[in-house]
Amino acid sequence: MGDQQQLEEMLPFLSLTSRPDVRATALQYLLGVTASKNSAEFFLKNKVFIEKILSLTEDSEASIAKDSYLCLINLTAYGKFCKVLLEDYDPVPKFVHTVTNSESEFADSACMVLSNITREESGAEKVLDSLVKGDVGLAKVVEVFCQEGYNKKGKQLHYIGPMLSNLTQLREARQFILDRDRCVVQRLLPFTQYQGSVIRRGGIVGALKNCCFETAHHEWLLSDDVDILPFLMLPLAGPEEIAEDEMEQLPDELQYLGDDKQREEEPNIRQMLLETLLQLCATKRGRKTLRDKHIYYILRELHTWESQPGLKQAVENVVQILISDEPEDVDDLNEVQIPEGVQKQLDQLQREEQQ
């Protein structure tokens, strides 16, 4: 990290009134500092630099504003910094307006900052509260995310996906996405197969996984009104040939996928998809639907293809529930004898929901 005296000498140059070339040089040096290990500690002890960085995000020189955002992206990787930033400076309304401004050059950068800020639950609460109380709500953020080409400067806004995933740590955000009158979840489902960005794809799969903690909505999610299952299964399906009699038992969307069908390439996303299926198995209606749709055939092929031991086990956990016997009158899986590995997974999911 840079010498503290050197950094303090730069303060006068980090002003909107200083010469642009001098301002840019000073900020580039500061950007290098933010990328160094434990840099957040320095800024938390010298908050005047935080104020300077925030003010320079409004700089008329685009390169300077860009570097200011990059400083914030680096620093918001640290939870302690996020907490101070939110409590002392309340920058969320500004960042949300930047994201939803279709003419903003810095919408992607603001997206990344918000994604970082919302990783911890306390940050997610602050951002959601700002969205609820502000003039730009969560509905607008979802609309911007779903509208291709919304930003006229070519910014892709992929990091809204992880931000939505982070916000769905909170029940209020999950209830918003699952509101049956808003049709939000239906708009998000196609992004489980969005090939243009693993960030966007993973963010939405994470949000859906979190929403499936709301077991009261399982029947609706699996019904024709939403039909979530094909959107979870298609990324897990491959090009393998399945016997004709088995193929005909699958949902139409999962039949005859072709020799060029590619599975989800990102292991973390495959993991989240399998965890979502496991969560849907928490209710009797969910287990029955997954059995009736015969998704076992796709999971069987996935298990054969999967090379990572942890993910093979995740497949087995879902399959064991689907093929296990259970009393007809039992709706709570806690009352059913479940293999130990599966029980551990369900217990973990339950703990995450309670947190």
Image (cartoon, rainbow, N blue to C red):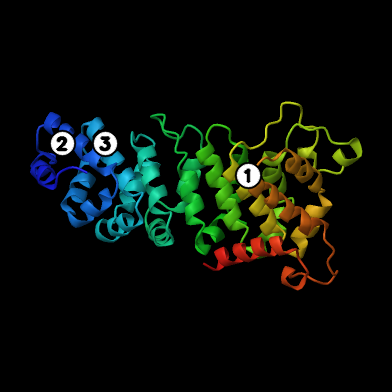
Which labelled disc corresponds to residue 270? 1
87 with respect to 118 (left or right) = left
Mark 1 or 3: in front is 1
Front-most of residues 60 and 229 = 229
- The spot of residue 300 in percent (x, y) is 79, 44
> What is the C-alpha distance between the residues marked 2 and 1?
44 Å
341 with respect to 102 (left or right) = right
Q: Residue at x 30, y 48 (%)?
A: 75
Mark 2 or 3: in front is 2
- The spot of residue 26 in percent (x, y) is 15, 36
Residue at disc 3, secondary structure:
helix
Residue at disc 2, secondary structure:
helix
- The spot of residue 172 in percent (x, y) is 51, 63
Pointer 2: what residue?
Answer: 26
Q: Residue at x 83, y 72 (%)?
A: 329
Q: Counting residues from the N terminus, which is met first, the one under dot 2 or under dot 1?
A: 2
Extreme-right residue of the structure: 245
Q: Amino acid at mark 3?
A: Asp
Q: Amino acid at mark 1?
A: Arg
> What is the C-alpha distance between the residues marked 2 and 3?
11 Å
Quadrant (top left/top right/bottom left/bottom right) for the N terminus: top left
Q: Is residue 262 above or below residue 268?
A: above
